């Protein structure tokens, strides 16, 4: 017996049966997976977890896939928390380095679980809109699971990601537009070709995979959550996922009720959630022409905007935009001072951290988790001088 009790509309609370194919709710909102947490707590405790193999499937009682054979894996690891050294000598600022996951980005988490569920539900052909990493991860996990995949790449997608998805056997299309335009093409194909839409939050299971960031972070830190989490936010699945993880862990009595302050970081060239946060709104207006080196967070409109903003507000967090110049300067600083060459999205979290310390939104003594969400080597790197100096 599985541990999922039902699915629930994140807007209206309407309930849906587990074990069936689902997209959005009838209200057009993301569905969230709900577990029978008493059953989970009966089967799993913090001590048994210690003896399990590393990787996200160690939390399978808190994931929707029932049959072990469907748990498609490419050797996921527990990603390390690397403390900053000279840039934060107290050791209270750590980078969770997600670049160590298969396909070199944390999109592996969401897509491992989404593909595994697709396999369990008998779905044969998956499609996705992407700025790069999601398409590559879908293609890889679909190949692993023996499923077909079609990937629509936004104009800003780094060339290496386009090639990466294609090498994994996906049918790849480059689109002269942003990721939401790619999303429309996927939707058309759902009607005409019967594809299954794996867009962020339009199927319920990628978020469950991303939730494992929060489970892992809690476990790695001895079930004590940090003061602040600084997250490079595009569609927001990772942030929503962590927030959900903390609620589930608290319900099982594994962490206390103290939540980290959740800080959303976006690029100044595409900051719809920051603008909505500043205006006190719950839904973000579409950002007209996204332009940033941080392709992974160039999302002009996010269907889960209200879930991100609710978590930021409930946690006493904040949302901040950083410009590309600061992102690239932060990247070079981390690389030169710490030996950590991070992706632009990851660099954005450090740039935002520095700024937030200056403005007093983060205290220098706070325990802070930053993220490196993908390998820097997936992005074009200039040889010298660094672009931020020119
Ligand atoms: C997708 C992506 C993000 C944003 O993740 P969301 O959870 O969808 O907001 C950040 N960084 C990189 C490198 C990404 O590929």
Image (cartoon, rainbow, N blue to C red):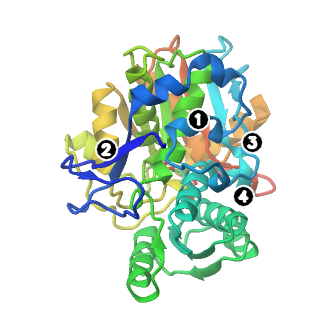
Seen at 70% across and 58% down, the residue is 379
Residue 233 relative to residue 120: left or right: left
Label 2 to label 1, Cα distance in Å?
23 Å
Label 3 to label 2, Cα distance in Å?
31 Å
Q: Which mark's residue is nearer the viewer, 4 or 2? A: 2
Q: Which mark is residue 307?
A: 2
Label 3 to label 1, Cα distance in Å?
30 Å
Q: Nearer the viewer, residue 228 or 201?
A: 201
Q: Residue furthest bottom?
A: 192
Mark yes or no: residue 355 visible. no
Q: Residues within 10 Å of mark 2 (few under 14, many from 20)?
A: many
Give the mark, 3 or 2, whose residue is nearer the N terminus: 2
The residue at which mark 4 appears reads as 378
Q: Position of residue 282 (x, y in %)?
A: 22, 45
| Secondary structure of the residue carrying numbered label 2 | helix
Q: Which mark is residue 147?
A: none
Residue 163 relative to residue 295: left or right: right
Q: Are marks 1 and 4 in contact (CB under 8 Å)?
A: no
| Secondary structure of the residue carrying numbered label 3 | loop
Q: Is mark 3 within 8 Å of ligand 1?
A: no
The residue at which mark 1 appears reads as 59
The residue at which mark 3 appears reads as 341
């Amino acid at each position: 017996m599985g541990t999922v009790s039902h699915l629930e509309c994140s807007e209206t609370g309407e309930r849906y049966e587990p074990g069936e194919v689902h997209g959005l709710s009838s209200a057009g909102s993301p569905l969230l997976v709900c577990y029978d947490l008493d059953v989970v707590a009966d089967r799993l405790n913090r001590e048994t977890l210690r003896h399990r193999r590393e990787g996200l499937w160690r939390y399978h009682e808190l994931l929707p896939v029932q049959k072990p054979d469907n748990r498609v894996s490419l050797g996921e690891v527990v990603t390390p928390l690397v403390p900053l050294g000279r840039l934060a000598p107290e050791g209270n600022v750590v980078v969770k380095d997600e670049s160590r996951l298969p396909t070199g980005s944390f999109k592996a988490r969401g897509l491992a679980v989404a593909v595994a569920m697709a396999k369990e539900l008998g779905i044969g052909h998956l499609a996705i809109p992407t700025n790069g990493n999601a398409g590559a991860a879908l293609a890889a996990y679909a190949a692993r699971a023996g499923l077909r995949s079609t990937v629509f790449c936004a104009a800003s997608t780094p060339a290496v990601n386009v090639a990466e998805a294609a090498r994994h056997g996906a049918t790849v299309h480059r689109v002269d537009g942003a990721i939401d335009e790619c999303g429309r093409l996927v939707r058309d194909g759902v009607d005409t070709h019967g594809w299954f839409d794996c867009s962020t939050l339009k199927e319920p299971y990628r978020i469950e995979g991303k939730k494992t960031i929060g489970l892992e972070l809690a476990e790695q830190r001895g079930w004590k959550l940090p003061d602040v989490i600084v997250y490079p936010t595009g569609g927001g699945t990772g942030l929503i996922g962590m927030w959900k993880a903390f609620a589930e862990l608290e319900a099982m009595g594994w962490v206390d009720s103290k939540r980290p302050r959740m800080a959303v970081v976006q690029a100044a060239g595409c900051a719809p959630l920051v603008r909505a946060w500043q205006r006190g709104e719950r839904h973000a207006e579409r950002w007209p022409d996204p332009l940033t080196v941080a392709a992974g967070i160039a999302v002009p409109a996010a269907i889960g905007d209200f879930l991100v903003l609710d978590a930021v507000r409930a946690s006493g967090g904040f949302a901040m935009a950083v410009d590309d110049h600061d992102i690239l300067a932060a990247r070079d600083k981390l690389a030169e001072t710490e030996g950590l060459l991070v992706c632009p999205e990851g660099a954005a979290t450090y740039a935002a951290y520095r700024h937030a310390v200056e403005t007093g939104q983060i205290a220098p003594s706070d325990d802070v988790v930053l993220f490196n969400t993908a390998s820097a080597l997936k992005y074009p790197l200039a040889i010298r001088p660094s672009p931020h100096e020119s």
